[in-house]
Image (spheres, coloured by chain):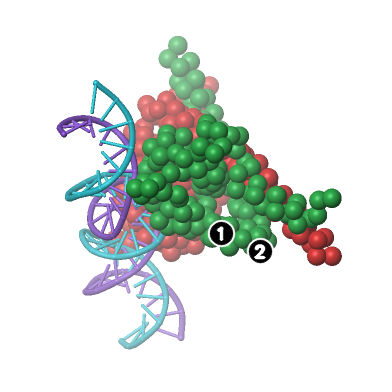
Chain colours: A green, B red, C purple, D cyan
Amino acid sequence: MIDSTTVTMERARQDLCATEPRHPRPDGQDRYTISEVVASTGLTAHTLRWYERIGLMPHVDRSHTGQRRFTNKDLDWLAFVGKLRLTGMPVADMVRYAELVREGEHTFEARQELLEQTRRDVIARMAELHDTLAVLDYKIDFYAGARKASESERA
Amino acid sequence: MIDSTTVTMERARQDLCATEPRHPRPDGQDRYTISEVVASTGLTAHTLRWYERIGLMPHVDRSHTGQRRFTNKDLDWLAFVGKLRLTGMPVADMVRYAELVREGEHTFEARQELLEQTRRDVIARMAELHDTLAVLDYKIDFYAGARKASESERA
DNA sequence: CGCTTGCTTGGAGTGCACTCCAAGGTTCTA
DNA sequence: TAGAACCTTGGAGTGCACTCCAAGCAAGCG
């Protein structure tokens, strides 16, 4: 019999790494250099170090000489951060979310709220874009029509 | 008989002022102070002066003492610029469009292309947002489920 | 072993889109 | 006609999200 605590923890474990397919290396050997992460995320090395400095990354593991070694979990986190970035969420808010994750399961409610606010922002933004599209189409039609008219004039 | 030149010019006249309903003042008495424009556009006076300085506004008419007096046409232009801004278009590109408008009808093709590129950008952005929405919903459902599970555990 | 390429740090610099300031002239209302 | 509220300018400042730099250690290869 599986009790609900187990279920909760299993879901919590998924929390950081359930949204993306799978990364190249098999588990147990997931220690990527910064340049490998640059190649797979499209972020620059500068940005990755900066993310760590401001607390947007959990502290990244290091080699015996102090060089960063990223894990699959880090890549999953970066993929999710990339999605948040696409929503237009400010970096400060993403850092807030990262802090909540670090604080543990008792912040589930706060995290859900933050994500729901983001969701509302995304929907509002999509509506805005939808409206601009109408104006754009109106103008484009106007130019297309005006050009056709001046063409037939020349003919 | 109306020749096609007349038609073209009539459309050209509409070009700057056909996308918005109508502004408060009756025609012929459309000379708004900067603070009236602030009130009706939501932009700051600083921003309005800055728009003029960088060439994003056609040169605004002045009172005999040098204060700005905006016209309905200026308000229409600002409304359209507001739409372009909502698309995320950089100010430099909007200035480029404004330059094309100043250059006259022979830039219709270039203007249409610029707007069509913007349209493609808007559609791409909407698709991105649509994708992030799926991730957001996935996470929100996860938190909702986890919280419900830990509630029933407590019960 | 030497060479090239890669990684480290703190701190300074960049580009964008505003945003504000000081000092002074203008306009409106009582 | 006095006072408040509004307007003008060039230039400097702000906040965000990176972006770059110098100086020096680390890693992999023939």
Task: In this rendered view, identify the residue nearer to me: B120 or B80.
Answer: B120
Residue at 37%, 60% in the rendered image? B46
Residue bearing the label numbered 1: A102
Image x and y of residue A74, in percent: 51, 45
Q: Secondary structure at mark 2?
A: helix
A78 to A39, vertically: above or below: below
Image coords of residue A13 (percent x, y): 65, 49
Q: Position of residue B48 (x, y in %)?
A: 39, 56
Q: Residue furthest top?
A: A155
Mark 1 crowdedness (10 Å alpha carbons): few <14, some 14-19, many ≥20: few
| Residue drawn 45% across the image and 50% down it | A60
Q: Is residue A76 visible?
A: yes
Residue B13 appears in the rendering: no
- Given the image, on which type of amino acid does mark 2 rest? His
| Mark 2, residue position | A106
Left or right: where B151 falls relative to A46: right
Residue type marked 1: Arg
> Residue B81 or A74: which is nearer the viewer?
A74
Give me the C-alpha separation between circle 2 and circle 1. 10 Å
Marks 2 and 1 share the same chain: yes
Q: Residues within 10 Å of mark 2 (few under 14, many from 20)?
A: few
SS at badge 1: helix
> Circle 2 marks a residue in which chain?
A
Say which of D29 and C6 sits in front.
Answer: D29
Q: Nearer the viewer, residue B129 or A152?
A: B129
The answer to whether A89 is drawn above or below residue B116 in the figure is: below
Task: Look at 33% across and 62% down and name the residue there.
Answer: B67
Q: Give residue B58's mark.
A: none
Q: Is residue B130 above or below residue C30?
A: above
